[in-house]
Amino acid sequence: MIAILILIALAPGLFLAWYFYHRDSYEPEPKIKIIKIFFIGALMVLPAALIELLIVNVTKITTQGLVHILILSFVVIAPVEELLKYLAVRRWIYNSLEFDEAMDGIVYTVSVSLGFATAENVIYVLASGIGTGITRAFLAIPGHALFGALMGSYIGRAKFTPIKEEKLLFTGVILAIVCHGLYDFLALTRSAFSSMVILLLGILVLWTRIQLKKAQKESRLRTTQEEKEQVSKGAVRETD
């Protein structure tokens, strides 16, 4: 039974990691890099839990109801988790030679996000059972992937726009925190508002599709340009 629960917990994250990896069709990233950043994301679950618990204990949050949920969502959970994902990308992949196109920002940030979501999912599913696994497979796991894609699109643009680098990085992190916080707030209310989570994810899906198409177009143009330059260099050498 435990093996089945673990499989259910792992499946959605691994599938989405595979899906986003294959969107980078023109210059795919080394699989070992994707696996590495995925596992780093998984390891971020531990410091996230410790930091969140520390914040709650130190600040002694005593509010109740919607205010309590609002604080947990926007001040504790979302900032801690999204900042840790961002730091993982900046520390272990941002300056890598393999990070050589805007699309890579999405691929790597989604990978670290899904590593985090998958490790978190294993804990939740083992504790609460199959029902939780099925629900999270359609909501929480895609949510983490979409927050990662949102942040990653800005990280990718920042890497190749030095003049706006800091502004783009800041914007990407803030937007991911806001969307993650809104998702948690809606979900944790356990009321009619919770159904709006689906609307939020739907909007992020459409936005992500647009960003993926833009990034794929940029990658195609870049690949075509590089091929032309190689042909041109080859022709020059033959002439010499």
Image (cartoon, rainbow, N blue to C red):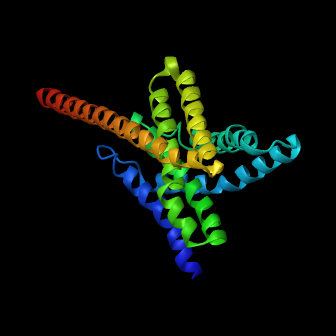
Rendered view: 3 above or below 217: below
Please indicate whether residue 228 sits to the left or right of residue 100 in the image.
left
**Residue 4 against residue 74 in the figure, above or below:** below
Quadrant of the image containing the C terminus: top left
| Residue shown at 47% from the left, 66% from the top | 11
Name which quarter of the figure residue 31 lies in.
bottom left
Residue at the limit of the structure toward the top, as seen here: 163
Residue visible at 50% across and 70% down in the picture: 8
Nearer to me, 195 or 80: 195
Looking at the image, residue 74 sits to the left or right of residue 60; the answer is left
Q: Tell me the residue at 59%/54% (across/down).
A: 116
Q: Is residue 234 left or right of residue 218?
A: left
Q: Is residue 98 visible?
A: no
Quarter of the figure with residue 74:
top right
Q: Is residue 136 left or right of residue 62?
A: left
| Number of numbered markers | 0
Q: Position of residue 38 (x, y in %)?
A: 53, 54
x and y percentages locating residue 35 in the rendered image: 50, 57
Q: Quadrant of the N terminus?
A: bottom right
* Rendering coords of residue 33 (x, y %): 48, 52
Residue positioned most to the left: 239
Measuring 79% from the left and 44% from the top, which residue is drawn there? 64
Residue lying at the far bottom of the rendered structure:
1
- Is residue 144 shown to the viewer in this render? yes
